[in-house]
Image (tube, rainbow, N blue to C red):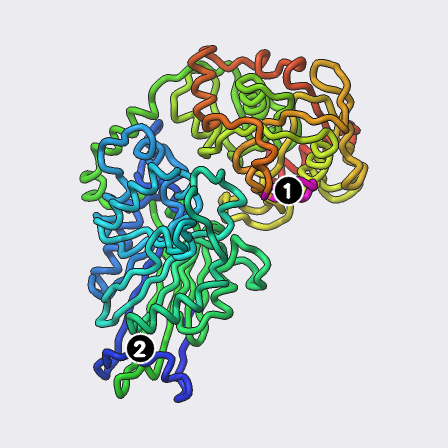
Amino acid sequence: MKTSHLAIPAVLLILFSCSHRLKDGEYTLTILSTNDVHGTWFDSTYVDGHLRKSLFAMNYYIDSVRTADGFDNVLLLDAGDCLQGDNAPYYFNYIDTITPHLFPRLLQYMKYDAVAMGNHDIETGHPVYDRVAADLEKAGAPFLAGNAIRDDNGKTYFPLYKMVEKAGLRIAVIGYNNANIAAWLSEEVWSGMHFVSIAGIIQRDVDRVRAKEHPDVVVAAMHSACGQGDGTILEAEALDVFNSVQGVDWVVCGHDHRPYVETRDTMALLNSGSHSRYVAHGKMHLKVEGGRIVDKFFETDLIPVDARKADPAMRAFFQRDFEAVRAFTLQEVGVLNSELYTRDAYVGMCDYMNLIHTLGLTQVPCDISIAAPLTYNGHVKSGILVFNDLFTIYPFENQLYVVRMSGKELKDFLEVSYDKWINTLPGDHLLKIQGRDDPRNQQKGWSFVNRFYNFDSAAGINYTVDVTRPFGSRINISSMADGSAFQPERDYRVAMTSYRASGGGNLLKEAGVDSDRIEERVISRHPEIRNILYDYLLKYGSIDPETIGDPSVIGAWSFVPEKLAAPALQADLALLFGKE
């Protein structure tokens, strides 16, 4: 447990003074926070009934703390990314839109006080998050996003803050979404608003809320990663705020999936990680004399969640919802005639990536596809596919875009992508890996230096990646897939995800393509890629290696020289995933 204690100097008393004079004495406020739950609502998976960490299990710990500390002394918050990542949110977002959405009902049951909205919540689109926001408001746990600014009148699209009374204290919870949404998501999903830097406005917001509401405690809840605290990363502003803002007692954050807590003299920070693995836990002890706070004492820790301790009453209450999601996700959708391993994408062409590329190249009019693996270490068995398998193959609600790029820009793009992916040989490792645990993927021992979902390969062309050459000279494109000439000066129609087209991963920017002006290059937009996969199965009935691997359609690529690259790749893969 981390603690911090402060006897507040007289010169700072004015900062913590209140117009509604507190009674003298000692106060203890408990804060519990969650974030990046990503739809892990139910404690059981839908196919094999495997127990997993969930909101049901977190509720066991939340109720335990409330029992120990008193319900009226515990503040419960979430820092966003609630509506994406699992079958359950998908079902209630897009399939059953008549039944009241499950997420507000879950939060009402658990008695959350407020939620800071996340980028993946925005990703669901206006019809979903506008409906959920209205239901959350009724449930008493509003979506907060004070940096989502309306284009028409300059006001916030969602509420900036909520006032809560706990432990005899007036608490202002000020909430923010991630500021970098425009870099990842198509504008149509956030039309009518724009997002501004949290660090740029929070002091103004805190001062205004303090002046209007005179709170005793201020909590800044934000869906923003911790970052480096140096103001350089727009999507990671939590430590920037923690290092600079005045008049805030708690920072509750998320987005980076890294469990982290910290205490300082005047404030503390909570980040519970992701996927219901921890509940972040903090206590704030206050001493009041003469109506003013004269002493502060913080405690912070992380409560590990045990999947086996799911709340049975909560499970029973939402059993009908679980059965509805389970029935949907067990629908048979086609046949898979070869096993898919997403890890194979890191070492060369594979059936998994061939499928993703084929969806782009054959479903829309385009010349080339660029795509990355989106499941770190997924496996889909051959045989009958159910809808649940489509979430392993494609876990995100990305749309498919076709964007105009020159041949030179494409080559430069691939140079950037593979530079995030590999080192130059000779060297210790060909894959860019490091001996460090990665809490985002629950990977122990070794992990990628960069994010695997930015390792884009290309299809529709024939090319090699020379592992002995440095960045800028690794990629050699010999021809198009059909054998025709590849022309650096010519424009091509390139299929990519909406995430990539909007600037996600900075690959386009680093290749010299201005993603802020991507609309000038967009040729066409198409449905979400998982839906394209579903339509493919409805049309063809099966996924066959020969079809998705047709070299006349997808072309071919490889790491060269093979005698040097192949053993190095397999050695690195063994470090990441173990030997088979």
Q: Which residues are magenta?
A: 506-516
- Nearer to us in this view, 49 or 5: 5
Q: Position of residue 357 (x, y in %)?
A: 58, 23
Examine the rendered structure and indicate whether residue 510 appears above or below residue 97.
below
Q: Amino acid at mark 1?
A: Asp
Q: Amino acid at mark 2?
A: Leu
- Image quadrant for the C terminus? top right
Comparing labels 2 and 1, the label whose residue is closer to the camera: 1
Examine the structure image and report whether residue 514 is included in the region drawn in magenta.
yes
Examine the rendered structure and indicate whether residue 112 appears above or below residue 428.
below
Q: Would you say residue 93 is visible in this rendering?
A: yes
> Label 1: few (<14), some or many (≥20) within 10 Å?
some
Q: Position of residue 418 (x, y in %)?
A: 69, 37
In the picture of the structure, the residue carrying the numbered disc 1 is 514
Chain-order first, disc 2 or disc 1? 2
> What is the number of the mark on residue 286?
2
> What is the number of the mark on residue 239?
none
Q: Position of residue 273 (x, y in %)?
A: 44, 52
Examine the structure image and report whether residue 23 is included in the region drawn in magenta.
no
Q: CA separation, marks 2 and 1?
A: 51 Å
Please give the name of the residue rendered at 27% of the width and 56% of the height, measured from the top-left corner: 113
Please give the name of the residue rendered at 47% of the width and 67% of the height, measured from the top-left corner: 242
What element does badge 2 sit on?
A: strand
- Nearer to us in this view, 542 or 488: 488
